[in-house]
Image (tube, rainbow, N blue to C red):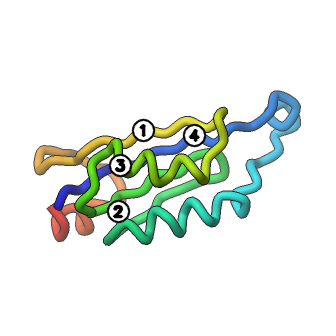
């Protein structure tokens, strides 16, 4: 099994950006549940982006295929493997140490 970081940048129309309106994150709850169903996971998010760490047996391409049903064409996603050579400045170090 491998550990992947999955990063999202959720699309917001220009008028929402100008008015500083946050993304309706509840519309992404099915996506979050789909990620959690992949395997052991940890989430870090704010109103416009979200980062997950996931340990699973799928490849990045397979993960993307499963998650593509839950994101819009304007959303951005990055899926990459995390190896044991990493550095973190927030509370993911314990999770990474336990899962890599």
Q: Nearest to the eye among marks 4 and 3: give it.
A: 3
Residue placed most toward the observer, 20 or 80: 80
In the rendered structure, the answer to whether residue 92 lies left or right of residue 13 reads left
Quarter the N terminus occupies = bottom left
- Callout 1: 10 Å neighbours few (<14), some, many (20+)? few
Residue 9 image label: 4
Q: Earlier in the sequence, mark 1 or mark 3?
A: 3
Distance of mark 2 from mark 1, alpha carbons?
Answer: 20 Å
Residue identifier under label 1: 78
In the rendered structure, the answer to whether residue 73 lies left or right of residue 39 reads right
- Callout 3: 10 Å neighbours few (<14), some, many (20+)? few
Residue identifier under label 3: 62
Q: Earlier in the sequence, mark 2 or mark 4?
A: 4
Query: Residue 57 is drawn in which quadrant?
Result: bottom left
Residue identifier under label 2: 91
Element type at mark 3: helix
Instruction: Indicate the position of residue 79 as horizontal and vertical percent values.
Output: 37, 42
Q: Earlier in the sequence, mark 3 or mark 2?
A: 3
């Amino acid at each position: 099994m491998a550990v992947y970081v999955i990063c999202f940048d959720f699309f917001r129309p220009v008028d929402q950006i100008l008015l500083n309106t946050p993304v309706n994150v509840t519309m992404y709850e099915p996506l979050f549940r789909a990620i959690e169903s992949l395997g052991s996971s940890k989430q870090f998010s704010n109103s416009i982006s979200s980062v997950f760490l996931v340990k699973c047996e799928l490849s990045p391409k397979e993960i993307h295929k499963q998650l593509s049903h839950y994101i819009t064409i304007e959303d951005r996603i990055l899926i990459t493997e995390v190896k044991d050579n990493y550095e973190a400045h927030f509370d993911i170090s314990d999770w990474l140490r336990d899962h890599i």
